[in-house]
Image: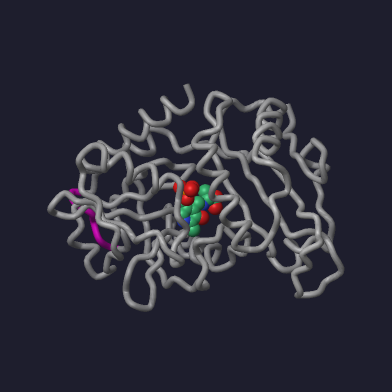
Amino acid sequence: MSRIAYVNGKFVPQRHAYVAMEDRGYQFADGMYEVAAFIGGALLDAERHLDRMEYSLAELGIPMPASRASIRLLIAELIAQNSRRSGLVYIQVTRGVAPRNHAPNAALRPVLSLSVLPVSIASDAARAKGAKAVTAPDMRWKRCDIKSIALLPNVMARGVSVSAGVRETIMVNAQGEVTEGSATNIFFVRPDGAIQTHPKDTHILGGITREVVIELAHAAGIAVVERPYAAADIPKAAEVFFTSTSAFVMPLTHIDDIRIGDGKPGPVTQRLIALYHAHVAKETA
Ligand code: PDD
């Protein structure tokens, strides 16, 4: 069965899903997006994703394109019309279509588009093996908390790990601190067993998986420190993992030329993987 997308108020085959040339998303990257997982047809952490969507739109001064309830119904319909039972939904809202002019016109009608991405959620086998990453400078702007479609620095950062043949690029700011991955949040397990990650502020995207993992860790009695981690301390980390909608909790076994721990997924990461799986099962039951 072919992929079906939602654009310009209609469900259409993906190959016929086009937006206008003067869509401000195309000309100014004037818009935001969300990516949420669906499992067995059910959207994971839907309310949290919609909260973040409303937050990004409010910060950009773009109105919600439809009510939350309508957006949920459209997503349910999109999932029903596509053949996959599990995968990722891509949601994008741009400020609208207008002749090119920097001024953001408040009267524009926002453009909502939805699609199902032809990629799978990382497998248990991939998580059991773990992944490798490299570091690169964080070249982004001062509002990384907005899930903006302006992703050029993230794309360039990801290019560094593509060239290195590894899974992710860990971004390091001018102060030598790890901010986050090109499309993931990074956690360090310290020798004292606490997990440390960059605080949720304007320097990172507040990942939904990050937020859930922090809540699960608190509930399990694992100490969580939300403070920037120095890239120079990567060799001291007992374990490192990243979180994202498409990978869940992914152990990192090597960063640059450094082997993390014994080069295998460690016990704290494995415990969080199991807790996250239980969360997914409960949420999508
Ligand atoms: N990326 N940080 C950045 C810069 C991201 O782009 C993402 C998500 C995350 C993790 O957030 P979450 O746990 O909500 O997926 C952190 C999405 C999946 C993407 O761009 O495809």
In depth, the one of 144 and 48 nearer the eye is: 48
Residue 146, x across and y down, in percent: 55, 61
Q: Quadrant of the N terminus?
A: top right
In depth, the one of 202 and 174 nearer the eye is: 202
Q: Residue at x 37, y 57 (%)?
A: 133
Within the magenta stretch, is there residue 140?
no
In depth, the one of 246 and 147 nearer the eye is: 147
Residue 131, x across and y down, in percent: 36, 48
For this view, does 72 lie left or right of residue 163? right
For this view, does 30 lie left or right of residue 233? right
Residue 25, x across and y down, in percent: 73, 61
Residue 263, x across and y down, in percent: 23, 49
Q: Taking the image as drawn, is residue 183 in sight? A: no
Magenta stretch: give its range: 257-262
Predominant SS along the magenta part: loop
Q: Residue at x 80, y 55 (%)?
A: 109
